[in-house]
């Protein structure tokens, strides 16, 4: 923590530094605007009058069809609302559990997805349970089209379930009730698939942290956790790139959510959240999206109307729900610190036991990668801590796609989501650690492109490079939390007592219907006489229209691009000013000591403690085990030091190894627990793990048979030179050193040495990544086996544009 003199010195220079930073932001924005300016390309035309007439006629036709498409959007909105806003899933489904019937009712239900014709489901495959975001819109984005998360899981033969929710929350419903209901949904899925691995829980955006809450409180119910574009570390982000993280502070804290709930008679309107999303990119909201429809009016309306039906379906939350979300996540960032509390107790993410897949995009301005990944650093400050926990985390990062593209893009589904499904078949066979999932486009034997996924082990410390300033720019958010608490208290004391009783149910409903986002839907529908009149003209236009490309259309596109560029400049200036306002206000308040009690451990100078390994107990466990432990350790030792893991080959190798009776006889949970244990032993004591390997087998023949089995496996796997070398080296090291007479007829367990006694053997101990290297031993009797670490692949690489 800063001393008083350091805080005073920083406060005296902060306004000047912020001013210089703001000037640089403005200069960069103006530079981008200047570089985007282009001269119009005036088309050459032999008959300017005919070209002008042709353009005006085409423009009139497109405008007529454009406004009629908006009329259809309004009609769809009204029809969807009248029908009760059912989920917009592309697939048929049956509701099998209705949370509205629970003792603590919630507006959630569990639906079983009906596979399309021709898709065969394996009832013993891992089931998928998908949770969509409840952030203003309705459910369905995870199964919006055939090429989607739902579609990819179905094609892989897995049963798929979907967590639906309804427009209106149940009376008294809280987030703890929702979490408990989702846990009951998982129990029902497990009951329906008793012979399958535990379900994979997939959370999209807000559904990601909702899935984490379920997995943290009920770790025994989740087999794997997938988080797509899910914000968890809400204070994280990069200055100049993620303006949404400043919104809570610039609005004064959580009291605005309480005000909106009071105006809604205890219900928060999701249209406010959607309005915030649209405000992030005014050029896209006001110009690009609409012009794309206008420019491609002959082909674009079906896609536009399909998306707008979902985008325009606004759902409600109870005041208790939105208040918990704002105070614990948006403002407090309490989830990773274990301070997020519900009626069932605190949510401790360290209780997660299922392997986790995190999918984020550098082009996402709603959930930037820092918010998706930094929780890993918050829980596990270094690689040693992650290994010690036994946790497996796989990260996947897209370079360009936006927030919605993560969920609705068919290309993303066919590539990233399909490979995530493939990964989940073997994720529980991975050794604890952090991995990067890299997907390359390669040319198959048939000449067609296909996707190939591989895993590269990374150090947790590498995640620190995602954010600038060593995350010290998160310190002012602690002051935001303190001011928010004060503002909420003032509002609850001085305003709520007289405002809340004045609002009636009818007044709240009128207020919701008059929200600008709703007005633009029902205001231009068939109830509007002008829209009805335009519909008649549009029918005539459709009947006689000949799609064409007038010569002057290029000028129209140039003018539209200039308008969008101007709005981009406005956005950049607005965001730079908003950032300046935030840090000028809360930076100074933080330096004054306000909110200092809210500063998390990872921002304090003393840092976080290193994990404490019980090395005596680990050493005692090295020679203990059976043939199954030996096979698992042998597999780990053979793959140590490999540059990467090909997911497809890993799956084939795992199926091959399950032919061994010792492994096939184990329950999946037992097998995976043995993998975690042997991986920790081989990582912590690599040399001793090799030396004690023979003691895990009940005979020399069993050890020799294991080597033969792996030798046959490695020889059938392409490009396995490294593994083959490791196998030969390990065989030469451990197999000849033990004669038949040295093998006891029956192994008897050996007692572990007391914790205060040092082992008699000399050991090589794996040091945590963040610790200083130990001094070189002077004794020549000590042998050091350097722990293996996967290095970046030096083999065949894909083209730059194909890599992600």
Image (tube, helix red, strand yellow):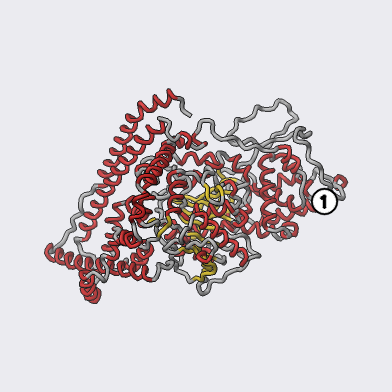
- Name the one closer to the observer, 740 or 306: 306
- Left or right of residue 320, residue 260 in this image: left
The answer to whether residue 447 shows anywhere in this view is: no
- Name the one closer to the observer, 133 or 429: 133
Tell me residue 440's x, y (percent): 49, 54
Count of number-bearing discs? 1
The answer to whether 192 is drawn above or below residue 371 in the figure is: below
At 24% from the left and 68% from the top, the residue drawn is: 548
Tell me residue 51's x, y (percent): 15, 64
Tell me residue 775's x, y (percent): 65, 27
The answer to whether 439 is drawn above or below residue 338 in the figure is: below
Q: Name the residue beneath numbered marker 1.
A: 699
At 58% from the left and 63% from the top, the residue drawn is: 127
At 29% from the left and 52% from the top, the residue drawn is: 283
Q: Label 1 crowding class (10 Å Cα cut-off): few <14, some 14-19, many 20+? A: some
The picture quadrant where one finds residue 485 is: top left
The picture quadrant where one finds residue 764 is: top right
The answer to whether residue 684 shows anywhere in this view is: yes
Tell me residue 111's x, y (percent): 51, 67
Element marked by disc 1: loop
- Left or right of residue 650, residue 398 in this image: left
Q: Looking at this rendering, what residue extends furthest in the top direction?
A: 5
């Amino acid at each position: 923590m800063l001393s008083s003199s350091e805080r005073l010195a920083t406060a005296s220079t902060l306004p000047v530094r912020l001013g210089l930073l703001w000037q640089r932001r403005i200069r960069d924005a103006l530079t981008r605007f200047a570089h985007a300016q282009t001269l119009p390309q005036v088309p050459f035309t032999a008959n300017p009058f005919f070209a002008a007439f042709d353009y005006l006629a085409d423009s009139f036709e497109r405008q007529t069809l454009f406004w009629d498409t908006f009329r259809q959007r309004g009609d769809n909105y009204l029809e969807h609302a009248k029908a009760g806003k059912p989920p917009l899933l592309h697939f048929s489904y049956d509701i099998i559990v209705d949370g509205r019937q629970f003792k603590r009712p919630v507006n959630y239900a569990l639906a079983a997805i009906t596979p399309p014709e021709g898709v065969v489901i394996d009832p013993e495959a891992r089931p998928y349970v998908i949770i969509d975001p409840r952030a203003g819109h309705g459910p369905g984005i995870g199964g919006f089209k055939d090429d989607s998360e739902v579609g990819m899981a179905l094609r892989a033969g897995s049963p798929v379930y979907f967590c639906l929710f309804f427009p209106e929350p149940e009376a008294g419903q809280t987030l703890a009730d929702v979490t408990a209901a989702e846990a009951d949904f998982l129990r029902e899925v497990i009951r329906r698939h008793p012979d399958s691995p535990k379900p994979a829980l997939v959370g999209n955006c807000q559904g990601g942290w909702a899935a984490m809450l379920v997995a943290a409180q009920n770790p025994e119910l989740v087999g794997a956790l997938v988080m797509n574009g899910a914000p968890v570390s809400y204070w994280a982000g990069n200055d100049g790139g993620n303006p949404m993280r400043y919104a809570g502070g610039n609005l004064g804290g959580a009291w605005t959510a309480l005000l909106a709930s009071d105006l809604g008679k205890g219900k928060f309107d999701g249209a406010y959240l959607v309005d915030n999303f649209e405000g992030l990119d005014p050029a896209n909201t006001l110009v690009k999206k609409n012009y794309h429809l206008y420019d491609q009016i002959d082909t674009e309306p079906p896609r536009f109307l399909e998306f707008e039906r979902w985008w325009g379906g606004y759902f409600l939350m109870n005041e208790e729900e939105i208040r918990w979300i704002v105070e614990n996540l948006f403002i407090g960032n309490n989830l990773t610190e274990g301070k997020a509390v519900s009626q069932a107790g605190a949510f401790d993410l360290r209780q997660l036991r299922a392997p986790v897949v995190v999918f984020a995009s550098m082009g996402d301005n709603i959930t930037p990668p820092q918010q998706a990944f930094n929780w890993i650093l918050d829980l596990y400050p270094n690689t040693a801590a992650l290994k010690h926990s036994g946790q497996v985390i796989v990260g996947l990062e897209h370079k360009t796609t936006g927030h919605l593209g993560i969920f609705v893009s068919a290309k993303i589904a066919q590539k990233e989501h399909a490979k995530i499904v493939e990964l989940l078949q073997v994720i529980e066979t991975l050794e604890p650690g952090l991995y990067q999932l890299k997907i390359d486009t390669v040319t198959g034997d048939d000449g067609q492109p296909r996707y190939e996924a591989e895993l590269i082990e990374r150090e947790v410390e590498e995640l620190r490079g995602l954010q600038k300033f060593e995350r010290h720019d998160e310190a002012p958010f602690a002051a935001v939390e303190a001011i928010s608490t004060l503002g909420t208290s003032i509002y609850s004391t001085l305003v709520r007592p007289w405002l809340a009783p004045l609002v009636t149910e009818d007044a709240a409903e009128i207020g919701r219907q008059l929200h600008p986002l709703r007005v633009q839907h029902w205001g231009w529908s068939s109830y509007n006489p002008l829209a009805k009149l335009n519909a008649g003209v549009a029918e005539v236009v459709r009947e006689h229209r000949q799609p064409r490309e007038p010569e002057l259309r290029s000028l129209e596109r140039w003018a539209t691009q200039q308008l969008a560029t101007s709005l981009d400049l406005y956005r950049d200036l607005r965001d730079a000013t908003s950032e300046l306002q935030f840090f000028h206000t809360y930076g100074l308040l933080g330096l004054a000591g306000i909110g200092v009690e809210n500063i998390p451990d990872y921002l304090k100078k003393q840092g976080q403690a290193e994990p404490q390994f019980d090395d005596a107990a680990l050493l005692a466990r090295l020679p203990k085990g059976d043939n199954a432990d030996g096979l698992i350790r042998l597999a780990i030792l053979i793959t140590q030091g490999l540059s990467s893991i090909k997911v497809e080959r890993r799956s084939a190798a795992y199926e091959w190894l399950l032919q061994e009776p010792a492994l096939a006889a184990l329950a999946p949970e037992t097998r995976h627990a043995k993998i975690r244990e042997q991986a920790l032993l081989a990582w912590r004591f690599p040399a001793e793990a090799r030396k004690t390997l023979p003691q895990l087998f009940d005979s020399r023949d069993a050890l020799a048979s294991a080597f033969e089995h792996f030798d046959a496996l490695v020889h059938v796997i392409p490009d396995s030179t490294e593994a083959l070398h490791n196998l030969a080296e390990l065989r030469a090291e451990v197999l000849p050193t033990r004669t038949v007479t040295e093998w006891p007829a029956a192994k008897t367990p050996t007692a572990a040495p007391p914790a205060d006694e040092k082992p008699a053997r000399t050991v090589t101990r794996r040091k945590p990544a963040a610790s200083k290297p130990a001094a070189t031993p002077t004794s020549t009797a000590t042998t050091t086996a350097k722990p293996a670490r996967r290095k970046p692949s030096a083999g065949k690489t894909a083209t730059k544009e194909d890599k992600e």
